[in-house]
Image: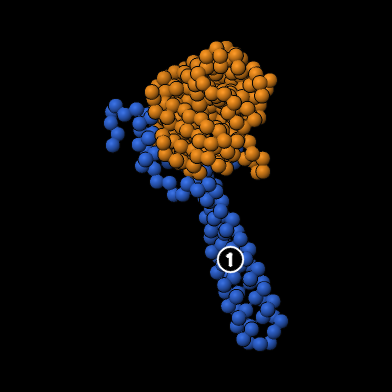
Amino acid sequence: MSSATESRADRFARELADLKISDPAAGHARLWQRLGAALMIAGIVLGVAAYLISHRTNSSFTQGDAITIAVGGVTLAVTGSALFLRYSLTGFLRFWMARQSFEMNLLAEKVFAGGLLSAGDGALDASSATVESSAPSGSADS
Amino acid sequence: MSAVLLELRNVRAAYDAVTVLHGVDLSVRAGQVTALLGPNGAGKTTTLRVAAGVHPVAGGQLLLAGRDMTGARPRDLARLGVCLIPEGRGVFPNLSTRDNLRMMTFTGRSRDEIEEIAFTRFPTLSKHASRAAGTLSGGEQQMLALARGLATDPALLMLDELSMGLAPVVVSRLYEHVASIAESGVAVLLVEQFAAAALAIADHAAVLVRGALAHTGRPDDAFRASLSDLYLGSSA
């Protein structure tokens, strides 16, 4: 628990002790991302290979094997895609959400500053125009 | 003696196959200013990036308040109070001063609270609150960067080349602010090429040469005297 006399350094040490770090291993996320990409490619390769195997034979047993390989390939590709998306998009989405949150706050303040709540329909129209004009047309700071 | 908040133990770091830090040992205490000096390309900025979790550690340990945080995500470290102000200030040039400060509300502090922190410490910024940050002078931009850093309530503040492109009088004014921030209990790690200004406020200093610590100690006259040899390599 924090106390009134707790220094910033003490609080820092306490919060560090409380911090739950998912995995401090360096490159953890990148490893999963690469694994996802590898699985995705392996799945596609297996699917294509299974098609070629089944296409070049009349044996229903071999074709059955090819179907099994193809289903395995699809499973690998789906799993790999999920892993890849999970770890590659997380960082981007986090920033995007922070940016959206900031823009929304800004927009809300502009709307309220325009007296939306206190005025009638005319003010509503005016505030709609404000919303349109202040909508982000691209990242100003990127 | 105050607590050690940041400790690098035998830290090595590399860019692809090129190793730039060869076993750096460094500690930064709460309420003190530690200056990390060295010539261009010595690995100073990489050391800061490693300490902030932005650059991966190739070997060794990064400890914060005694806990091994090697490989921790930068956002976890930032949330705890590790703040890096990068070279080039890191402000949003197209946003106004006020909007730049407002961006720091992600920390949970209100806009008013952040503006109070910023404008109390740097009254100049309040005069330019509506101006685009890119149109401020270099010193004012650096003040804005410091204010944004302070808005995160840092326990460890790391500054990369604060003096870059600024007039000496502006630099010395900024360093006064840095000293005052450290007095409030914040651990400050300064990276500088130009030693004189940094040593004027530093409690502890270290010189990094070619990715290894060449000298550490209190910034006294003997330390200053050894600097030119270390920078120019005549004692190597």
Task: Check disc 1 and give the amino acid type.
Answer: Ala
Q: Position of residue B142 (x, y in %)?
A: 55, 23
Residue at 66% in and 26% down: B40
**Which of the chains bears the disc numbered 1?**
A
> Tell me, what hue is chain B?
orange
Relative vertical location of residue B147 with respect to residue A25 in this rendering, above or below:
above
Position of A123 compared to B209: left or right? left
Q: Colour of chain A?
A: blue
**Rendered-image quadrant of the C terminus of chain B:** top right
Question: Percent from the top left, x then y, of residue B138?
Answer: 59, 21
Q: Quadrant of residue A111?
A: top left
Q: Residue B3: horizontal and vertical position, in percent?
A: 39, 28
For the N terminus of chain B, the image quarter is: top left
Label 1 packing within 10 angstroms: few (<14), some (14-19), many (20+): many
Q: Which residue is mark 1?
A: A77
Q: Is residue A103 visible?
A: no
Q: Residue at x 52, y 51 (%)?
A: A28
Vertical side of A19 occupied by A82: above or below: below
> What colour scheme has been applied to the protein in the rendered image?
by chain
Q: Nearer the viewer, residue A49 or B215?
A: B215
Residue B233 sits in which quadrant? Answer: top right
Q: Position of residue B204 (x, y in %)?
A: 49, 21
At 60% from the left and 79% from the top, the residue drawn is A67
Residue situated in front as seen by the camera: A111 or B56: B56
Can residue A10 be seen here?
A: yes
Seen in the picture, residue A129 relative to B139 is either above or below; the reply is below
- The residue most toward the right is A56
Q: Please tell me which residue is depicted at 28% across the width and 28% down the height of the picture.
A: A4
